Amino acid sequence: MQAYRKFEPLVVVDKTRQTYNVSRRVFVDPEVLAAEQEEIFERCWLYLGHESELPKMGDFVTRRVAGRQIIFSRDAQGKLNALLNACPHRGAMVCRERQGNAKSFQCFYHGWIFALDGACRDIPGADSYPEGFKDKPEARLQSVARFESYRGFAFLCFDPDAVSLETYLGGAKEYIDLVADHSEVGMTIVGGTQEYSIKANWKLLCENSFDGYHAATNHATYLDYLKDRADNLVPIALNGIARDLGNGHAVAEYRAPWGRPVAQWIPAWGEEGKQDLEAIYQRLVERFGVERADRIARTNRNLLIFPNLVINDIMAITVRSFYPVAPDHMLINAWALAPVDENAHRRHDRLTNFLEFLGPGGFATPDDIEALEQCQRGYANNKETCWNNLSKGMAKEVPSYDDEAQMRAYWNEWNRRVVGA
Amino acid sequence: MTRVTRQEVEDFLFMEADLLDEWRLPEWLTLFTEDAHYYVPSTDVAHDAPPDNNLFYVADDRYRLEQRVKRLMKRTAHVEFPHSKTRHLVSNVRIRAESGDDLDVSTAFITYRTNHGTTNVYFGTGYYKLVVTSGGFKIREKRAVLASEGLRDQGRVSIIL
Ligand code: FES
Ligand SMILES: [Fe+2]
């Protein structure tokens, strides 16, 4: 692949010395951000939303993806669509609500009306246009070039020539399956979006989302909290691996002492919880056999789908996507994913688990936000201190979940796309 | 019982705000009942949405509220170390409903937070469920409903609103 800009080496690997260094320029330079827009966001498959967000015909949400304004809708045929939210007439945003249900969208400027699949339904003063004009492609709300789903996760791509979503996801499909298989009925996004921001480069959140190395110090208070009540934990050591899944996707996969709503019981969830989780686990065994049931229910996964989708299946499941608005500023949307058929008690435990750790009001994520912002501040010293070190565990055959192999997998792909190495 | 006046409620809420701004969080905690809850809902759900089936920013029961205070008082709560400077402004206090010793109160709040040279503003409506006890008011529920679009400007809600 030929990158359109020329950069000096930004990712420098020395296998003999076992060093893997990333230039801090990549976090501060607007030129790098512009190259990322061209080489990554214009070409990769990007997460738009989850199918469960649009249960009924006529449901829609509007969302920004890689700088575009997108309408994610379920049309009258029940089909999902990704439409560019710009009127074919003179460009106004046609849908200005963040979510809802509608039979059609009417542009408020001159009143053109569109169906939820983008077809133009009506044009005021249609007799001033040629016969049949409203059925022409130029009268439609335009669809995004590519739009495909995998196991309920809907992605779009602005590159018409991109490989299929499944080819793109490659080795990451195995891990999406492990999440989607939590329930045979299906998974759903729980109501309520956490919308926040971090004054730091967006790639720092990619790294942070599956960084197993920082827990002991950065999340000391969260670990204190878990230990404060013996019934919050089961005696299982933090232990696991990291895997490069190809195409820049990577995962940390590990066991941990916290409760998992599917399905690792902790005493705090009581006898009733124990029975519920046992039933969930048994059903997984029936469906998949013991080995896979154990993997689904009892291992944790911090999965990064290149470039910017995080699915962390840990003490709860968070789906998180984020975009740069400047080299030192990103906007984040985070959701909770849960089995459709989860009962009210287990849903409650799940959301409690989620909020204790995750999100901008939790006991852990705010300290991640602080760490990322302090890194960004440190990059003011770039002229003298130029390199991030991502060498941890480089010599290992099987890298541990708390090494940095998962980040190296990400950076290798980033480097291939942006620098063209 | 005698009717509670708005002024009495305001005095209580102003005192609460001062305790927060002075980082006297363990004392602040004593204003709450043993079955208390503290909520900050996400901003794309209804202001009275239930926390059991909606993802909030914060949905603390009494136990987690204690843990939140405990955490915030530690040096290892990195996001609030050094402590940010805050000013909680409480206004537009209205007693919405009264029955027996229970009181529904709403406020308009603006909270400024400064840390590392950046100032953020949290604003919205505070919904309180207060109880009149022999020892004065207690808070049974505090729900801080942000009027902003999520936390796009503030980035986090690491302080108590
Ligand atoms: S811009 Fe939409 S109808 Fe004119
Ligand atoms: Fe973290």
Image (cartoon, rainbow, N blue to C red):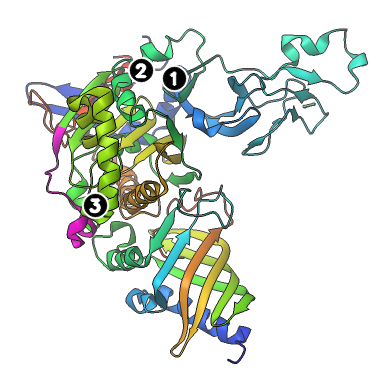
- Please indicate whether residue A96 sits to the left or right of residue A128 in the image: left
Q: What residue is shown at x 38% (from left), y 27% (from top)?
A: A184
Kindly identify which numbered label has been placed on residue A188. Answer: none
At which x and y percent is residue A298? 21, 36
At which x and y percent is residue A252? 22, 32
- Callout 1: few (<14), some (14-19), or many (20+) C-alpha neighbours within 10 Å? many
Residue type at the position of mark 1:
Trp
> Residue tagged by mark 2?
A169
> Residue tagged by mark 3?
A219
Whether the residues at callouts 3 and 1 have beta carbons within 8 Å, the answer is no
Looking at the rendering, in which quadrant would you find the C terminus of chain A? top left
Q: On what subunit does the disc labeled 1 rest?
A: A
Residue type at the position of mark 2:
Leu
- Please indicate whether residue A282 sits to the left or right of residue A308 in the image: left
Q: What residue is shown at x 59% (from left), y 71% (from top)?
A: B107
At which x and y percent is residue B100? 57, 82
> Residue tagged by mark 1?
A45
Compare residues A328 and A337 and report the one nearer the observer: A337
